[in-house]
Image: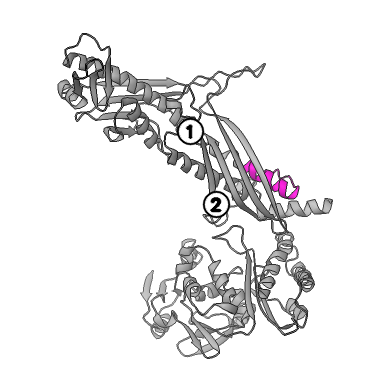
Amino acid sequence: MIVKQAKSVEDALELLSHYGNCKIIAGGTDIIIQMNEKKVQPKVLIDISKVEELKKIEEDGDFIKIGSAVTYTDIIESSIFEGNLSGFKKACRLVGSPQIRNRGTIGGNIVNASPAADSVPPLIALGATIILESKNNIREVKVEDYFSHSETFGIREYEILTAIRFRKPKGVLTFAKLGLRKALAISRISIAALVELDKDNKVSFVRIASGSIGRYPMREHELEEFLQGKVFDDAVIDEAVKVLQGVMDVRLANRSSLPYKRRAVEAVLKEALGEVRK
Amino acid sequence: MKKRGRGIGLSFYGTGYGNGFPDVSNAWVRLLKDGKIGVYVGGAEVGQGAMTAFVQIAAEALGVPHDRVLLEIEDTLTTPDSGTAAATRQTYNTGNAIKIACENFKEKLKEVAKDILNLNSTAALEVKDGEVYLEIFPQKRVSLEKIADFLGGNILEAEGSFTAQTTKLDPETGQGAPYWPYTFSACGVELEVDTITGQVDILKAVLVQDVGRAVNPHLVEGQMDGGYAMALGYALFEDLNLKRGVMGNRKFSKYLIPTSMDVTELTKIIVEDPESTAPYGAKGIGEPVMIPVTPAILNAIYDATGVRITELPITPEKLAKAFSDFEKEG
């Protein structure tokens, strides 16, 4: 196996088109394990961890752009994700261990496409898009569609995910996760919510995404429709839990994990929605 | 819903092989050329601190600072059999063997010192601070270094052997003294249970350990921290997930152990009540430090929720199911 260190995105794309059977490596927290388990066996690894343009977090007017090789630690330590965006920071803080957060990247979390990826539900709730670059083309794809319609919007072997972009929200982004221990825990359930309330405490905008309650992280449209326009109080949140449990009963029918998850989701959804009011 | 509860667990544990099985530890002690003392035992250091405890016991018995004692362990070519580092027996059993060997060694030192000092007898000779001296006329003294010089190439060496006393249980009556000594422990925990998710959050924990005498209090505390963390894993996390003899959880991403975030700070209380048959009163605590923790956790869950758990580990999934069943039964 050959390892090539890319100096720039251009350089990385050139290498990618030059060699066959390539894989991109950034933090290596997923791909190294997959290589050890022989689940992937690339001939060439292209290392993008030293590409400066992929390691920046930038504010551009109403938008925030995160380079794909930005680590969880970079996000946790950035002052950009304070206040109404702190739910994103919380999601990144709950990833793995300090060692994994120091190495693992936001772009890697997306392309690894685990249903339990902690950073993905907040990005879906934010309506974020990802930028996929190839030698001759640039595509911008919604994170949500990347997972739900991967045959069309998934990454191609000649592409590199270079950045994640989203519009700064008016509402509050929150995140809650159920793991089986306090650190180094794979999410059994995760929920991210972006909620905007009007002066009458009614939900004027809502976008909710879940992790680990389906084959991939996804929007929870039924829950959003239920909450839209409702007064955001305890009774409505209790009802919202039942709506989501109803969705899970269909989506996870016959799964052995359903009885536990449909019970436990109450605590996770209540934590996520409860933090909107804080 | 989150509910709080408190629980205690108590245990007493017989250390050593027990039940009349011959439980023997041997030790050798030898005078080295530079007047330092070599201690040779086959007891293994497995992280429990045996090496430190052995040196401390030898230094105490010989009346020398610990840096005068050179310990050799584990090498079967150069050390006698001191039994396994198991059954919580090394400090008590091998500690006793070392103490006996050191006492025998001191008598041999006195014999040589008697000759060097032109005395008629070894009576009133004392071994202390690297010297042998006459208690009734302390000007008469000789250092261990001088004794080693005097001996030239001749080896001065003593042996010590300790066999623990236990009796087999009578198969008819069940009577006997299967273990000696016993070590006593107590644990108290205060925890919070999430009855929806089945997660258990330990808020406070205290572990009380009878040690006879703490040879090294820091090491005892280390053992207590370790035993507590291990018991926490046993109670709440560690699940092989055996199915038809096949381990389902074969890797640490599935076989969960507590992380440092899961292990609450533990209040540790050492109780010292010297055991008369032990070296300086010290009993073993390797296994006992773990035993009362899990019952304390289970009792606290019962106190918090009214649900009795009878299967370990109490993973969130199993606990949530137990609460769900409990709610249905009313």
Q: Residue at x 66, y 43 (%)?
A: B7
Q: Amino acid at mark 1?
A: Ala
- Which image quarter: residue B292? top right
Q: Earlier in the sequence, mark 2 or mark 1?
A: 1
Dot 1 falls on a residue whose secondary structure is loop
- Which image quarter: residue B228? top right
Q: Is residue B311 visible?
A: no
Label 1 is found on which chain of the structure? B
Residue B277 left/right relative to A200: left
Q: Which residues are magenta?
A: B294-311
Numbered circle sitting on residue B263: 2
Which of the two residues, B306 or A263, is positioned nearer the viewer here?
Answer: B306
The verdict on a common chain for dots 2 and 1 is: yes
Note whether B245 is above or below A272 in the view shown: above
Q: Provide residue A116's location: percent of width, then percent of height.
A: 60, 68
**Alpha-carbon distance for marks 2 and 1?**
25 Å
Q: Amino acid at mark 2?
A: Val
Q: Provide residue B178's location: percent of width, then percent of height.
A: 57, 22
Which of the two residues, A120 or A93, is positioned nearer the viewer here?
Answer: A93
Residue B233 is one of the magenta-drawn residues: no
Residue labelled with disc 1: B86
Q: Provide residue A48's location: percent of width, then percent of height.
A: 41, 77
Foreground tag (2 vs 1) = 2
**Taken as a whole, is the magenta stretch helix, strand or loop?**
helix
Q: Provide residue B86's location: percent of width, then percent of height.
A: 48, 33
Residue B299 is one of the magenta-drawn residues: yes
Q: Is residue A204 visible?
A: yes
Note whether A235 is above or below B238 in the view shown: below
Quadrant of the drawing holding the N terminus of chain A: bottom left
Which of the two residues, A186 or B233, is positioned nearer the viewer here?
Answer: B233
